[in-house]
Image (cartoon, helix red, strand yellow):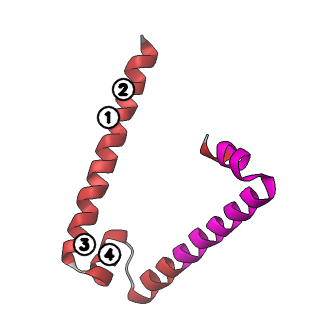
């Protein structure tokens, strides 16, 4: 829903250019994460955060991840309840 709206506001050419730049940034940062994880022999994102930023940031990530997943479950349940009635 946001992509068509942003394309109408920026125009087709600029919108596609921004989309391609953002796609490249996502690809590049993902490649960096994979490379660091491979070099450090880490297979878990949480462990990677601990290796790069320390235990405090790992715990913060784990709590945020838990809250996001819990929130997703709650939203899914609410959508299910409202669509059944």
| Mark 4: few/some/many CA within 10 Å (<14, 14-19, 20+) | many
Who's the residue at 32% across and 83% down the image?
52
Residue 11 image point, x, y percent: 77, 52
Q: Secondary structure at mark 2?
A: helix
Residue 36 image point, x, y percent: 45, 85
In the image, is 34 to the left or to the right of 12? left
Indicate the quadrant containing the N terminus: top left, top right, bottom left or bottom right.
top right
Q: Quadrant of residue 70?
A: top left
Residue linked to disc 4: 49
Toward the right, the furthest residue is 13
Residue 78 numbered tag:
2
Task: Report the Cα–Cα distance between label 1 and label 2.
Answer: 6 Å
Sequence-wise, the earlier of marks 1 and 4 is: 4
Q: Are marks 4 and 2 in contact (CB under 8 Å)?
A: no
| Mark 3: few/some/many CA within 10 Å (<14, 14-19, 20+) | some
Q: Nearer the viewer, residue 36 or 24?
A: 24
Who's the residue at 21% across and 67% down the image?
59
The region drawn magenta spans 4-31
Q: Secondary structure at mark 1?
A: helix
Q: Are marks 4 and 3 in contact (CB under 8 Å)?
A: yes
In the image, is 58 to the left or to the right of 83? left
Sequence-wise, the earlier of marks 4 and 2 is: 4
Task: Report the Cα–Cα distance between label 3 and label 1.
Answer: 26 Å
Residue linked to disc 3: 57
Residue linked to disc 1: 74
Residue 17 image point, x, y percent: 74, 64
Residue 24 among those drawn in magenta: yes
Task: Report the Cα–Cα distance between label 2 and label 3.
Answer: 31 Å
Toward the top, the furthest residue is 85
């Amino acid at each position: 829903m946001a992509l068509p709206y942003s394309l109408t506001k920026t125009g087709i050419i600029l919108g596609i250019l921004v989309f391609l730049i953002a796609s490249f940034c996502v690809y590049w940062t993902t490649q960096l994460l994979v490379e660091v994880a491979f070099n450090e022999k880490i297979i878990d994102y949480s462990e990677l955060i601990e290796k790069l930023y320390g235990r405090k940031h790992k715990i913060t990530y784990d709590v945020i991840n838990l809250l996001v997943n819990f929130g997703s479950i709650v939203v899914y349940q609410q959508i299910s309840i409202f669509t059944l009635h």
